[in-house]
Amino acid sequence: MAPVIAAALIGAGASLASSGISAYSNYKSQEAQMKARQQAAAELRQQGQITDREYQSIINDIKSYYTNRGSLGTKDDVNQYKQAIEDYNPEDYASIDYSNIANADANGNFVYDKTKEDFLNPYYGRIIGDTANQLQHTAAGAGIGRGTGAALNIAKGVSEKSDELYRTAMQDYQNERNFDYQKFQDAINNNWKQLNALRSGTEYKIGLEGNLAQDYYNTQDSRMSDILKAQQDKLNAQQTYASSIAGLY
């Protein structure tokens, strides 16, 4: 074989061998990279599963916390609050039952059915008669007799005695009327105070029940918010792992 041809064949063989080695090296490199990617993807998937379990544990912990929370408000409190609102009627505390109040009519007006004559001395007639007799006897003893002077004196004395008895009766009438009126006023005021106290107590109780109901709603809102946040974090983590795995290929 000619030297030139031999040299060419040797050069071609060397080139083919070099190309084969390079191709083989590239194949091995790609294979290694693929294995590395597969291993990385497997590790990411494993880490993703661990993360999912961790988030599920967090969610379970949140649910357990709110279930066992020493909450003041409960669902029963919400129902009680709703019922209290439905039962509350301000008009129940806006009027007084006057039927049990002495000297009060149906409209709450003061009624006093006595007059001063009811307080007049029951022996009025006898007292007036005795006064007239006594004055006549006195006049006779003084020698005045039954003349005009004696009659005027007796009339004046009887009038004065009658006026005295009527003034006493009027005073007694006014004293008792004023006393009964004061009792009437006291009863009215006490009834209003009782109604106001009942209304204030009812409104205060409703307010407390409202606070308990609000506490329950706030607790439920916080529970749901915490769970949704944990679930959203879990979803974001899953998406991050999925993007990272996809980026390996």
Image: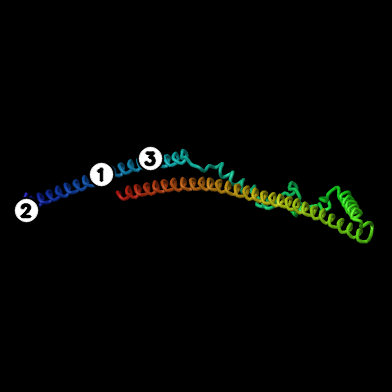
Residue 57: x, y in percent? 40, 39
Q: Give the camera-side residue of 224 and 82.
A: 82
> 10 Å neighbourhood of mark 2: few (<14), some, or many (≥20)?
few
Secondary element at image label 3: helix
Return the disc, 1 or 3, that comes first in the chain's sequence: 1
Q: Amino acid at mark 2?
A: Val
Q: CA distance from mark 1 to mark 3?
A: 26 Å
The amino acid type of the residue labelled 1 equals: Ala
Amino acid under disc 3? Arg
Q: Which residue was labeled with disc 3?
A: 53
Label disc, if present, on residue 36 of the rendered structure:
1
Q: How many marks?
A: 3
Tell me, yes or no, if residue 84 can be seen here: yes
Estimate the x, y position of residue 162 in percent, counting from the top left: 85, 55
- Near-viewer residue (184 or 48): 184
Residue at far left of view: 3
Of labels 2 and 3, earlier in sequence is 2
Query: Looking at the picture, how far across and down is residue 247, in whole percent?
Result: 31, 50
Specify few, some or many for label 1: CA neighbours under 10 Å numbering under 14, 14-19, or 20 or more: few
